[in-house]
Image (cartoon, grey):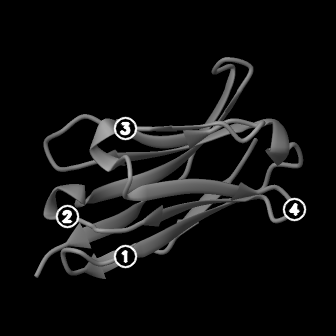
Amino acid sequence: QVQLVESGGGLVQPGGSLRLSCAASASLFSIYRMGWYRQAPGKLRELVASISSGGSTNYADSVKGRFTISRDNAKNTVYLQMNSLKPEDTAVYYCNADRAAGRFNYWGQGTQVTVSS
């Protein structure tokens, strides 16, 4: 069992920045594909960004050039740096850990990000 704890959410003005963190309890953290997802009210959960065990990254088109995902395997932590935030980025952001093609898949409890003036 892997526990994921997100932090760093909050209220920010449009154009502002936030950095989300996700601390994992996994002893095999480095071999997990890590992802950030988000879910806005009335919408389906969507992938925002992911990073493989080898460091390859993938982004949703809506956040390319504004968000950066990174990981620190020594700290068992994955980050999401969010810049130039827009009101449409408002959502609950969830951390996900996955390995063995979904056989081992875990979610954090989520952290609220609100972009509003």
Name above or below for residue 82 compared with residue 47: below
CA separation, marks 4 and 1? 25 Å
Front residue (pair 59, 37):
59
Q: Which residue is mark 2?
A: 86
Q: Which mark is residue 92?
A: none
The Cα–Cα distance between marks 3 and 2, rounded to whole angstroms, is 15 Å
The answer for how far apart the CA atoms under marks 1 and 2 are is 10 Å
Looking at the rendered structure, the secondary structure element under dot 3 is: loop
Residue count near mark 2 (Cα–Cα under 10 Å), binned few <14, some 14–19, many ≥20? some
- Kindly state the secondary structure of the residue where label 1 is placed: loop
Residue placed most toward the observer, 59 or 95: 59
The residue type indicated by label 1 comes to Ser
Name the amino acid type tagged 2.
Lys
Q: Residue at x 42, y 57 (%)?
A: 67
- Classify 10 Å Cα crowding around label 3: few (below 14), some (14-19), many (20 and above): few
Which residue is at 72% across, 41% downward? 55
Q: Of callouts 4 and 1, which one flags the residue occurring earlier in the amino acid sequence?
A: 1
Please give the residue where the numbered disc 3 appears in the rendered image: 60
- Sequence-first disc among 3 and 4: 3
First in residue order: circle 3 vs circle 2: 3
Is disc 4 in contact with disc 1, using a CB cutoff of under 8 Å?
no
| Residue that badge 4 annotates | 74
Label 4: how many residues lie within 10 Å, few (<14), some (14-19) or many (20+)? few
Estimate the x, y position of residue 22 in percent, counting from the top left: 61, 61
| Residue 113: % across, % down | 31, 67
Answer with the quarter of the image where residue 72 lies: bottom right
Amino acid under disc 4: Ala
Q: Are marks 2 and 4 in contact (CB under 8 Å)?
A: no
Can residue 109 be seen at all in this image of the molecule?
no
